[in-house]
Amino acid sequence: MADQATKLRRIIKNTSSAAQTRPLARVITVTSGKGGVGKSNVAINLAIQFRKMGQRVIILDADFGLANIEIMFGTVPKHNLCDLIYQGKNIKEIITWGPMGVGFISGGSGISGMYNLSRDYLVYIIVNLAELDAIADTIIVDTGAGISDAVLEFLVASGEIILVTTPEPTSITDSYSLLKALNHHPRFSRTDTVIKTVSNRVESEAEGEQLYHKLSAVSNRYLKLPLTYLGAIPQDPQLAKAVMQQLPVSLANPSAKSVRSFENIAQKLCPGQGASEMVRTRGMAAFFSHIIKSRKLENEAELTSAKEPASIAGRTGTSG
Ligand SMILES: Nc1ncnc2c1ncn2[C@@H]1O[C@H](COP(=O)(O)OP(=O)(O)OP(=O)(O)O)[C@@H](O)[C@H]1O
Ligand SMILES: [Mg+2]
């Protein structure tokens, strides 16, 4: 078996060099200031739209413990990220395949627990997660509600953020608070991050645009942080109905008005099917290395001693 540290060095070299030796997955993180504004619906419906475009998509449900995606897909995962960390499962074993071949990984409490793991374990996890770059074209990370440290860690690691806001005044102020917290984060890089906004639950296109202009104006003025606009999703009873049926509305009712919006947004994210838009992609290994950067995993010298943990090296097919 190839030495884990050697593999990690190869992965880090690949993700940081201009001429990557293999394609990396595009990582898009969906977030919001206020909870319950439609993040998980945006994540699953964009995933379905990307599948329709022929992409391979995996959703990482990073809403620890709340299991949003599995409920919306009506699919119970056998394993989650904890099983990769603690039970020695490999990455393919922890992916659950939902409708239309959208893969998802349930975070469980795995990600929050990552901060307390030894370096050897982290090396093992990153080497495994890096394999997602070969399995998926796009990885959509669905973050939890609220502005927690864990959510901010995901956002600073992301090159591409989708910020979901609704016209409710509290949603707008909470989105601004999130942007402010992100902007103040010591590892946030404004040059390496694009923040794209979606206005959800609007009564009209104009209301969606207005919402974007409001948020963009305060962000530009007080944070000097530019935002771009992906579009609006209408208030749609069909979407709420699909949630009750545990299906993405894009599948439950493809002619629903919100589905047209998801199609438009997906098109905007992938104009010309990747022909023209240069999406800066860092891939999954870089994403997670970034999250745990405080441990200085990129430090070559540190890695020379990194070995696969004994309990994992000796893993068998035991279930979690
Ligand atoms: N465009 C919409 N039209 C109608 N209802 C909507 C729309 N978007 C979201 N909802 C309603 O809001 C609920 C919450 O949506 P969702 O679970 O996607 O939000 P969330 O931001 O992921 O929540 P959490 O912060 O708890 O993870 C849905 O179950 C649905 O009933
Ligand atoms: Mg959610």
Image: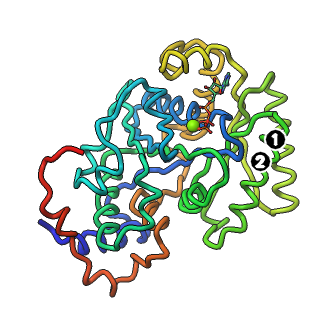
Horizontal side of residue 55 vs 165, given as left or right: left
- Colour scheme of this structure image? rainbow
Q: Secondary structure at mark 2?
A: helix
* Residue drawn 24% across the image and 53% down it: 87
Ligand 1 rendered quadrant: top right
Give the image quarter of residue 159.
Answer: bottom right
Where the N terminus falls, by quadrant? bottom left
The residue pinned by badge 1 equals 170
Near-viewer residue (89 or 299): 89
Horizontal side of residue 214 vs 143, given as left or right: right
**Residue at far bottom of view:** 301
Give the image quarter of residue 12.
Answer: bottom left
* Residue drawn 42% across the image and 62% down it: 114
Q: Is residue 98 above or below residue 7?
A: above
Q: Secondary structure at mark 1?
A: helix
Asked if labels 2 and 1 touch by Cβ distance under 8 angstroms, the answer is yes
* Residue drawn 51% across the image and 39% down it: 66
Q: What residue type is disc 1 on?
A: Thr
The residue pinned by badge 2 equals 174
Q: Position of residue 318 (x, y in %)?
A: 15, 47
Q: Position of residue 112 (x, y in %)?
A: 47, 57
Near-viewer residue (197 or 122): 122
* Residue drawn 34% across the image and 72% down it: 118
Where the C terminus falls, by quadrant? top left
Q: Position of residue 142 (x, y in %)?
A: 53, 43
Q: Position of residue 303 (x, y in %)?
A: 30, 80
Task: Count residues near mark 2 (Cα–Cα under 10 Å), then give few for <14, some for 14-19, many for 20+.
Answer: some
Q: What residue type is disc 2 on?
A: Asp
Near-viewer residue (200 or 61): 61
- Give the distance between the C-alpha atoms of the residues marked 1 and 2, in whole angstroms: 6 Å
